[in-house]
Image (cartoon, helix red, strand yellow):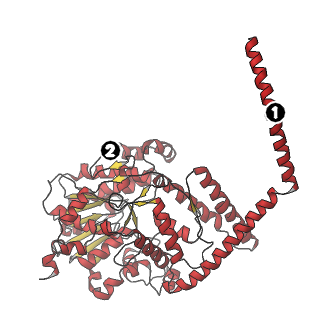
Amino acid sequence: MTDLEVSEVRGWYRNKTVFITGGTGFVGKALVEKILRTCPVRRIYLLMRPKRGVDIHQRLDDMFNYKGPLKASIASLSGGRTNETMLFDKIKESQPEVIQKVFAVKGDITMEGLGLSDEDEARLANEVHIVFHAAATINFTEPMRVAVNMNMLGTKRVVSLAHKMRNLESLVHVSTAYSNCHLPEVYEELYPAPMDPGRLIQLTEWLDDKLLEALTPHLVAPRPNTYTYTKALAEHLLVNDGGRLPISIIRPSIVCGSWREPVPGWVDNLFAFTGLLVGMGKGVLRSLYIKPGITLDFIPVDMPVNLMIVSAWNRAAGKYKPNSVPIFCCSTGSQKPLTSDALAVHLQKSVRSYPFNSPLWYPDGSAKTTKIMHQIHVYLVNIIPAHIADTIMRILGKKPFAVKLCNKMVKAISALEYFMLRDWIFHNTQTKCLWNTLSPTDKEVYHFDVEDLDWDDYIETYQKGCKQYIMKEDLKDVPQARRFMHWMHVLHRLVQLAMMYGVWCVLSSDSAISCYSLFFSGASKLLSLSPILAAAEEVDGDVS
């Protein structure tokens, strides 16, 4: 019996043609890799736009086979391979021919008609069976006009194209678990729209940038940013415009590095938790404003990717009414909760077990429960040293960079603050039900059940992934990095002792003692006068 005979999901994908938006993003690349490795599809079309002078065919080639001048310094540090080529290593070793199934289609999610030529639009309309819409801006501080154009109008354009597809069997839209983050408890259902999507689109067409920017905080409230706001409205656009299209929605929480596949710990960007992990490991991020004991919801990228593939098959299986839209939440909090306190323990262990080469300082940061203490710590430990470092760079005739880097880090941390101070319960009943319908083979191939996720093991895997794929460091360097970390620890403690001694010297100086004497003398006189003042007040009361 062949794998296709025991796997309903893989059997359904046989000879299908797939269209993917956002295929060059973090989730999109992982999706492309998994489809190529496990699904016997006929063809995959990726919507791509030229970028930085590189045309779409070169960009597609760079995904699988690095040859061009871009990222040369990065590739040289990793044996000529980039994050993308490492991602596809397993495929190139076992079945390199499947890469020929992937074709780039010139287009842009921000343009009318997706920027497709008439010929490409006709080809997609005639051939495509499955659409995965993963393109979006995930920048929390994105201007409203940009967020609307990408997250909302982009979705509207994809739906418009889907209506022209003669053989469409499934359309999977990637949303976010935080689209309804103003609610502490979120179910797998479509909640009322915060605003009519059409009206918001009209506002972005009518208002100038200055006025729209001024209105944005009032529009998005009680949500924290344009990302969560426009993703919520995109779901409504999808349902309203979708009609009888076979649509399903995936809501992942905070997507992080891979857990199991294609390579453990794979990650290709510094967004969200990855940036925090790298900042802490390099000794740059030394304070985090976070509510103690809250549940953080991270999900390894291979989980939503597997759920996307399975949900496409599930939606086409005829189990839903034509106009219904099943929603699947892909999260860990309700099944495998990770508290902020537990995360701190895991991080302390992993960062020191697999340290980065040459950290700027010993990774010994701490969580702050009050914002004022966090701000003071950031100012003393990050901002002031950054200005000092840039001053030294200018004296040496070199280009300063520390302040700019520090400001970016502070801005990134501030954008995450909302999510570090609140608890959410993301219910995933439909996701668990879908998991229970799968055959043993499909459960093994398309694993998205978080029940057996071990956080200690995963965080360590994630740290190793950041070291390999973000910092471009070889794991063979770990013993040397540990020795360097040991001496950084010694230096860190010596500096702390020196600072404590300096504070003690200041506090025990003659001038400081004079100040203490003056303070306590004044306080004692005030205390000695208090009974007299109280008696005087009583006399005044009696007279009145």
Q: Position of residue 59 (x, y in %)?
A: 40, 76
Q: Within 10 angstroms of label 1, few (less than 14), some, or many (20 or more) residues?
A: few
What secondary structure is marked by label 1?
helix
Where residue 226 sits in the image (x, y, percent)? 43, 51
Q: Residues within 10 Å of mark 2 (few under 14, many from 20)?
A: some
Amino acid type shown at disc 1: Ser
Q: Is residue 300 left or right of residue 238?
A: right
Residue 342 in view: yes
Q: Quadrant of the C terminus?
A: top right
Residue located beneath label 1 in the image: 528
The residue drawn where x is 36% and y is 58% is 333
Q: Which mark is in front, 2 or 1?
A: 1
Q: Vertically, is 540 above or below 410?
A: above
Q: Residue at x 36, y 77 (%)?
A: 60
Q: CA distance from mark 2 to mark 1?
A: 66 Å
Q: Nearer the viewer, residue 507 or 279?
A: 507
Q: Is residue 531 placed above or below 66 in the rendered structure?
A: above
> Image quadrant of residue 139?
bottom left
Q: Earlier in the sequence, mark 2 or mark 1?
A: 2
> Is 210 on the left-hand or right-hand side of 401?
left
- Identify residue for label 2: 193
Amino acid type, label 2: Ala
